[in-house]
Amino acid sequence: MRPTFTPDSVIATTISEHLLNAGTFSIEEINAKEAYIIETSTQDNHYKIILLTQGDCYCSLGPVSLHMNTSCIGVIRPRQACTMLVDEQTTGFILSFSYDYLQLIAGMPGIILPHLHAGLSEYYTIPVAAAERVPITEIALQIVEEYRCFSSLREEMIRSLFRIFILYVCRLNEVKGDIDYNRCPPLVKRFFALLENYFLTLKMPADYADLLAVTPAYLNEMVKRSCGFTTSYCIQQRIVAEAKRLIMNSELSLKEISYRLGFDDASHFSKFFKKFTGKRYSDFRRQIINR
């Protein structure tokens, strides 16, 4: 039985002190007797999938409030500050996993990861009908039971169940953002998976072409043919999305953000931000503060 929390309690998103593989995966069963708050920080490098089986809640993500209920599944990218208020009527699950864990259970994140991304969105919801929610909920319950078990095959069972769970979620995800990943060939899906993991350090199309063992021209042709954007554009937009996230969810200065994003100096980042957003850094920051 999980303990009771007061409304102002802050808890970590895990039902067990025994995390798999040094914290690469955890699951929380939401089933409280009183209201409480779940918080994640910009230092959290885990993806979050929120599945409610009863009730509803609001997730506060910077200036945005994401409404969650039983007719949808929530997906939140890593390093996204989130505050979730759960009342005593709400039940469900929060699954938290790292890129490395996804690689472990999928073999290659490029197979699964693109289906979890709605373009460059940091968070979104996936519609799910009542009938579709039943098997996903059953799998989540099985994962919880394995979490409480300490058999020799515990970790293998959880990996297998989670793989089925994530495949169900991916099949439900028909959200279309900037890029329709379902139309992308395997090479392009691998590019986007690599981009998600390395965009802070690798900023040139040639870097990704080398990792994929193709020429930059061929990679650019395949990416542009698949989604209508050049390789450079996709890299730049992922950096811009991360810049916006840092501005919205931290008190970091222009210099600190530019450093985190791998820019040599703040003026270079400032010009980059203005070029690809159409707004100066100071104006964007002021807009966020005044909301």
Image (cartoon, rainbow, N blue to C red):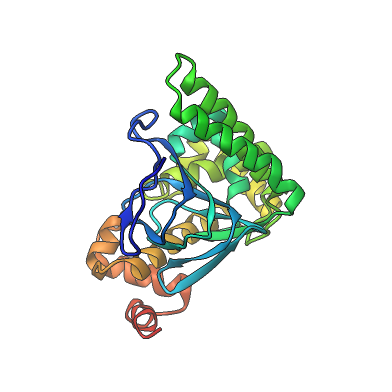
Residue that appears at 47% across and 62% down = 87
Please tell me in which quadrant of the rendered image residue 39 appears. Answer: bottom left
In this rendered view, identify the residue nearer to me: 27 or 270.
27
Residue 42 appears in the rendering: no
Q: Residue furthest right?
A: 131
| Residue 62 in view here | yes
Q: Is residue 173 left or right of residue 33?
A: right
Q: Position of residue 77 (x, y in %)?
A: 47, 53
Q: Nearer the viewer, residue 69 or 163?
A: 69
- In the rendered image, the vertical position of residue 255 relative to residue 227, given as above or below: below
Question: Quick one: quadrant of the N terminus?
Answer: top left
Q: Is residue 86 above or below residue 168?
A: below
- In the picture as drawn, the residue positioned furthest to the top comes out as 152
- Locate residue 78, reporting x and y percent: 42, 51
Picture quadrant of residue 257: bottom left
What residue is drawn where x is 53% and y is 27%?
159
Count of numbered marks: 0
Tell me which residue sits at (43%, 62%) in the image: 84
Quadrant (top left/top right/bottom left/bottom right) for the C terminus = bottom left
Asked whether, in this view, residue 6 is left or right of residue 242, the answer is left
In the foreground, 97 or 217: 97
Image position of 198 with respect to 277: above or below? above
> In screen coordinates, is 89 left or right of 14?
right
| Residue most extreme to the bottom | 290
Q: Is residue 191 above or below residue 249?
A: above
Residue 31 image offset from top left, x and y in percent? 48, 50
Q: Camera-side residue: 58 or 244?
A: 58
Q: Position of residue 40 (x, y in %)?
A: 36, 55
